[in-house]
Amino acid sequence: MYQYLTHKLRTCLAQRFFSSTTNSLINSRFLHSSPVVTNMSSTAGVVIPCKAAVAWEAGKPLVIERVEVAPPQEMEVRIKVKYTSLCHTDLYFWEAKGQTPLFPRIFGHEAAGIVESVGEGVSDLCVGDHVLPVFTGECGECAHCKSEESNMCDLLRIDTDRGVMHSDGKSRFSINGTPINHFVGTSTFSEYTVIHSGCLAKINPKAPMDKVCVLSCGISTGLGATLNVAKPKKGSIVAVFGLGAVGLAAAEGARIAGASRIIGIDLNPNRFEEAKKFGVTEFLNPKDFDVPIQKVIADVTNGGVDRSIECTGNINAMISAFECVHDGWGVAVLVGVPNKDAVFMTKPINLLNERTLKGTFFGNYKPRTDLPSVVEMYMNKQLELDKFITHRVPFSDINKAFDLMLKGEGLRCIISMED
Ligand SMILES: NC(=O)c1ccc[n+]([C@@H]2O[C@H](COP(=O)([O-])OP(=O)(O)OC[C@H]3O[C@@H](n4cnc5c(N)ncnc54)[C@H](O)[C@@H]3O)[C@@H](O)[C@H]2O)c1
Ligand SMILES: [Zn+2]
Ligand SMILES: [Zn+2]
């Protein structure tokens, strides 16, 4: 093991030496002619012009633009994005209806890519590594990173209103000198992007990137919300609110945990057919009842479910998800991202009656420490990903992925950067 690690370190150092030597050659050539981007390592240290899908205004189609991507600074890594997908969180901040508007911006946070170059101080990633970016990071030093319980890193936790990098408060993207904002530190709707090294999980290079990219947000979030946070016991009754990719990954977690009944709740009846493939045993549409859905759930479960996981982002669904758990032991977990001004209201007696309310980002997984093993769950066939991938589009058609999600069609749409 020790020999393997020292060999790995030497390989990494050799690669980096090669990349910085080539870089000085490139820089001197750069002075006399236009830059030629030949391969990944030869571009280290220079600005890379490439295509990115830029959101200029809230709710308006993204525009594929030529952007310039600056080299990574201290503790940063520049990656070549291979595949990315659309998560509902991108859509909320693009619509900016219940969120702070910040434009122009490059969205995207669910992706897989390859390290192109690394900035000063990065010692655990090298050129060519396969990585999954994560919207919340792991610095490894703070109290949260050192705690076994938390993944809310002090330095790199999700900050949806930040459009710049931590090291110098600047963007690495520009168009003719105009900076373009980053999104949640990842901005994967670009052929190249710069990410803090603490927000990149190094994964098995044999893992197919066009599939495991969905583990970089939605699927790990739903799975972890059930397995790490709700922790249903074998034989439990579990309710899942919202049967998109995140909710169905939560249902998958309930199935893996041995739940006896999995009740799926959604306003879109088209979701129910798809959800059958994920082990959801019963379906309820709140629109079909004239009493609150928590009352219906209590009636069909003899007082409430053991665990519920909310994956909608809707405040009323969040309240129902809490109020439908059984008194005495029920646990509800909030996963959906609410409107920034939403307020959660329930009678305190619901808590006094020994119900527990929790919330989680990224299913409580520590991105760098835990995500590689979630990828291995897929590689070992313990976790299926194909059934989450319902559509594929080339990068030039990225707006189709938005249309599908707006219409509530399909689960994840993989956007291929090279087609
Ligand atoms: N906490 C985290 O770390 C994290 C990570 C990823 C996504 N999210 C959030 O999880 C949520 C789901 O994401 P997704 O990509 O699966 O979205 P999605 O759009 O694919 O699925 C959401 C589903 O919720 C349903 N829904 C909406 N309002 C509802 C209501 N009131 N009652 C019942 N069902 C309702 C929709 O019909 C849809 O099927 C979003 O809010 C997203 O922002 C959170
Ligand atoms: Zn997401
Ligand atoms: Zn930290």
Image (cartoon, rainbow, N blue to C red):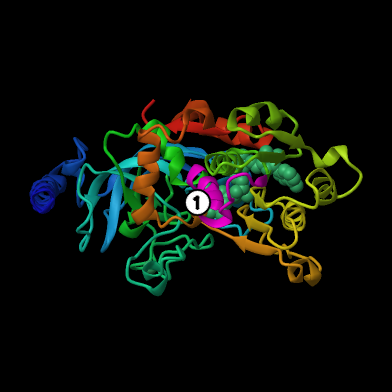
Please tell me whether residue 402 belongs to the stretch shown in magenta.
no
Rendered residue at 30%/44% (across/down) = 203
Left or right of 147 in this view: 323: right
Residue 175 in the image: state x and y as whole percent. Answer: 40, 49
Q: Which residue is mark 1?
A: 105
Q: Magenta region: which residues?
A: 219-238
Q: Is residue 293 left or right of residue 307?
A: right
Q: Position of residue 169 (x, y in %)?
A: 39, 67
Secondary element type, mark 1: loop
> Height in image: 331 above or below 192?
below
- Left/right of residue 182 with respect to residue 40 in the rendered view: right
Nearer-the-camera pick, 97 or 1: 1
Q: Is residue 405 left or right of residue 209?
A: right
Q: Position of residue 219 (x, y in %)?
A: 50, 42
Is 156 or 381 nearer to us in this picture?
381
**Quadrant of the rendered structure where residue 341 is?**
bottom right
Residue 72 image offset from top left, x and y in percent: 27, 56
In the rendered image, is residue 322 in sight? yes
Name the one closer to the observer, 353 or 105: 353
Q: Main secondary structure of the magenta part?
A: helix
Say if the magenta span includes residue 236: yes
Three-letter code for the amino acid on which mark 1 is drawn: Arg
Can residue 177 be seen here? The reply is: no
Give residue 144's quadrant in the image: bottom left
Q: Residue furthest right?
A: 290
Is the CB–ligand 2 distance for label 1 below 8 Å? Answer: no
Q: Nearer the viewer, residue 229 or 179?
A: 229
Which residue: 45% across, 62% down? 151
